Image (tube, helix red, strand yellow):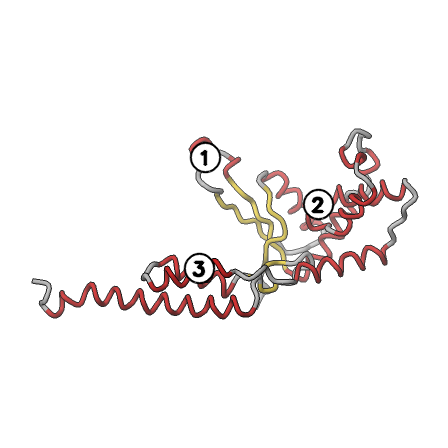
Amino acid sequence: MNPELITFKKFNDIALANALADLLEQHHIPYNIEESSLAFNPAFVNSELSKDYAVKIKGDDFTTVNKLLNDSETENINQVEKDYYLFDFADEELLDILAKADEWSAFDYQLARKILADRGIEVNDNILADLSKSRIEELKEPEPPQTSWVIIGYIFALGGGIIGLFVGWHLSTYKKTLPDGERVYGYNENDRKQGKWIFYLSIVVFAISIIYKIAPAFTGSGN
């Protein structure tokens, strides 16, 4: 069975997605590009601006591809104009870019490191590895308790609404992808457990409501 391909990066410009695809092909890394439409906007009907392009790769390849992207920007950062916005960042802000590399482009990440080095602040590979490890541990933490959504889910489940089904399914199954390709549950164990109860309760109540509506047709009581 082939490993699942999961979203590595999303773009709203097909040229950017294709540029990443070219890099992946050069290094023989399996990938797929999935196109999806964004929320409906009449102004963007049949427009490229209304589309989203997700480049998917294997989770095991995330670290390798991130390194390839960073390496590919090494030459570009030497040609950047001096009015580029990162040059106005304080040292702490630049260090924050290195600590949260997943929120920034490979170009900004490499440039932040170079600017710090030019300022006499050398950030070696060991420090970067520690920053990456700390960031992974931070992102592994589940989202805050979803009390409001749990309550809403139960309300819709008891009301026989299909929305309860989707709320329960989302709470119990949602996973987030970490920068190293690992996938972890997004919500804590209690929220996931409540999500399962909401999901199954929604199915039961929905089924009962359907039976209640069609029963008269079989019993003749509807005449």
Which label is found at residue 46? 1
Left or right: 86, with 1 as reference point: right
Mark before the other along the chain sequence, 3 or 1:
1
Q: Are marks 3 and 1 in contact (CB under 8 Å)?
A: no
Q: Decide: few, some or many residues near mark 3? Use Cα within 10 Å; few <14, some 14-19, many ≥20.
A: many
**Number of marks in picture:** 3
Q: Nearer the viewer, residue 72 or 185?
A: 185
Left or right: 15, with 146 as reference point: right
Q: Residue at x 63, y 52 (%)?
A: 8
Mark before the other along the chain sequence, 2 or 1:
1
Q: Residue 84 at x, y = what percent?
A: 77, 32
Quadrant showing the N terminus? bottom right
**Which residue position is annotated with label 3?**
167
Q: Decide: few, some or many residues near mark 1? Use Cα within 10 Å; few <14, some 14-19, many ≥20.
A: few
**Which residue position is annotated with label 2?**
104
Q: Residue at x 34, y 64 (%)?
A: 158
In front: mark 2 or mark 1? 2
Q: Is residue 82 above or below residue 169?
A: above
Q: Decide: few, some or many residues near mark 2? Use Cα within 10 Å; few <14, some 14-19, many ≥20.
A: few
Picture quadrant where residue 120 is located: top right
Q: CA distance from mark 2 to mark 3?
A: 31 Å
Q: Nearer the viewer, residue 3 or 121?
A: 121
Q: CA distance from mark 2 to mark 1?
A: 30 Å
Q: CA distance from mark 3 to mark 1?
A: 31 Å
Q: Are marks 2 and 3 in contact (CB under 8 Å)?
A: no
Secondary structure of residue under mark 1: loop
